[in-house]
Amino acid sequence: MHQLTLAEIARGLADKKFSSEELTKVLLARITQLDPQLNSFISLTEELALEQAKAADVRRANGENGALLGAPIAHKDLFCTQGIRTSCGSKMLDNFKAPYDATVVSKLAAAGTVTLGKTNMDEFAMGSANESSWYGAVKNPWNLEHVPGGSSGGSAAAVAARLLPAATATDTGGSIRQPAAFTNLTGLKPTYGRVSRWGMIAYASSLDQGGPLARTAEDCAILLQGMAGFDPNDSTSIDEPVPDYAAGLNGSLQGLRIGVPKEYFGAGLDPRIADLIQNSIKELQKLGAVIKEISLPNMQHAIPAYYVIAPAEASSNLSRFDGVRFGHRCADPKNLEDLYKRSRGEGFGPEVQRRIMVGAYALSAGYYDAYYLKAQKIRRLVKNDFMTAFNEVDVILGPTTPNPAWKLGAKNSDPVAAYLEDVYTITANLAGLPGLSMPAGFVDGLPVGVQLLAPYFQEGRLLNVAHQYQLNTDWHTRTPTGF
């Protein structure tokens, strides 16, 4: 049962081959047995899961038949879940039980999903390796000595190890797509505003976006269908009709114009990954796609711009965690200043503290114009590059990451080296575009991903391309040894 995709689970439940309760029990037992190797979960919610599974079985018995009805998933631990710990991977929120459900959680619950638990993540979603979590690093099921990517590494590792078929995740600078690439999954970052951020604890509000992590594009389409849609509670949510993503998967790629930016194939890219990307291009050409070289001239400025904007927003968003209303509070504070300093010093880990300091500096008097304002101007140039490119092509293709997953601890002493791993993913967040990573092969036994980008609200186009590619390749079907 644990090898079934979301689509196969939906068919199995509809055909009464098994019940949601039976499937849930199998997966909970599997998590208990195997997750100690991976550390992919922060909280397991067995009672809730069995209760939701039984309710889903009753709904099916009464004639309902939704694709997500009775499907087991997990939520990244920054989606608020009522009465359940929502920690953001941080000591700061270790004792926080959310008083309400995030919109993503409530929408998926209404669709009948079964919540198995909350997955591990980089603290406050800050990281590319899932090593900054207060609950310890997550291991990559393809090689337990390597990172699974971040910040959604817990969701990625759990799905890749077949502990569950799919999970929610979030992407601020590549945190869905990079772990997907590192663990042989399909991961989709929707257009900014497509999925509600209400109840999703913020890192950088203008960049964060929730999305699905699963093994196939078909499963991502099913999960995104349940997540997407306008939310009046979220001022950044966009009132745009949500198409039937599953219905659009089988469209022909004949004549599809795919742009390949020349800037993607510079000195920083592992040549073995470059070869796998070229193989992917050839597969898509066989399906009728037309390849065109394009240019994204401002890509080189994206990383410095991102690492000014994101920390600046983080320093503002995380100022609410001060030991007063919720979260970690230091013992016996002498006065209010001592309460603030010690609560924040004890509650936040080193990477979060580093980004808060960078952000506060960039926003300070005398430096705002020099750093933050300039970064926002670069952001606009990056967006303009994409708008120009999409006048000529339908989709942009390239590597998801410049290298395969590195060893645990390899970049801990050099955070900038880890930041540079986001070079291909952060431009989509700066521009607000949808992006998808799909499996494209292996280097030294470690998975490699190919990234697709599309114009605003064209998630369906990305899913269509990925699905057609997956019908003609088998990379996404490979399973890590031991799982």
Image: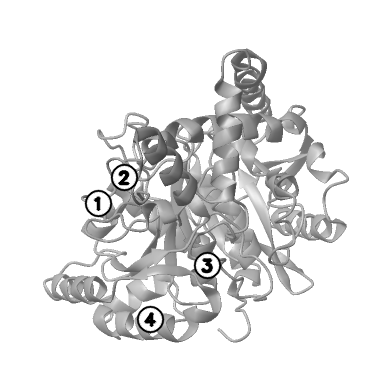
Up the image or down, 321 lies above or below 418; here it is above
Give the distance between the C-alpha atoms of the residues marked 2 and 1, in whole angstroms.
7 Å
Q: Nearer the viewer, mark 4 or mark 1?
A: 1
Which residue is at the front of the view, 436 or 367?
A: 367
Residue drawn where x is 61% and y is 59% of the image:
149
* Residue located 27% across and 78% down the image: 20
Label 4 sits on residue = 27
Q: Earlier in the sequence, mark 3 or mark 2?
A: 2
Q: Which residue is labeled 3 in the image?
A: 215
Q: Secondary structure at mark 3?
A: loop
Q: Amino acid at mark 4?
A: Leu
Q: Earlier in the sequence, mark 3 or mark 1?
A: 1
Q: Tell me which label, 2 or 1, sits earlier in the chain.
A: 1
Amino acid under label 3? Arg
Quarter occupied by the C terminus: bottom right
Q: CA distance from mark 4 to mark 1?
A: 23 Å
* Image coloring type: one colour
Judging depth in this view, the residue of 466 and 105 nearest the camera is 105
Question: On the picture, is 81 further left or further right than 210?
Answer: left
Q: Which of the marked residues, 3 or 4, is nearer the chain's N terminus?
A: 4
Circle 2 residue: 199
* Left or right: where 91 falls relative to 352: left
Spatial CA span between label 3 and label 1: 26 Å
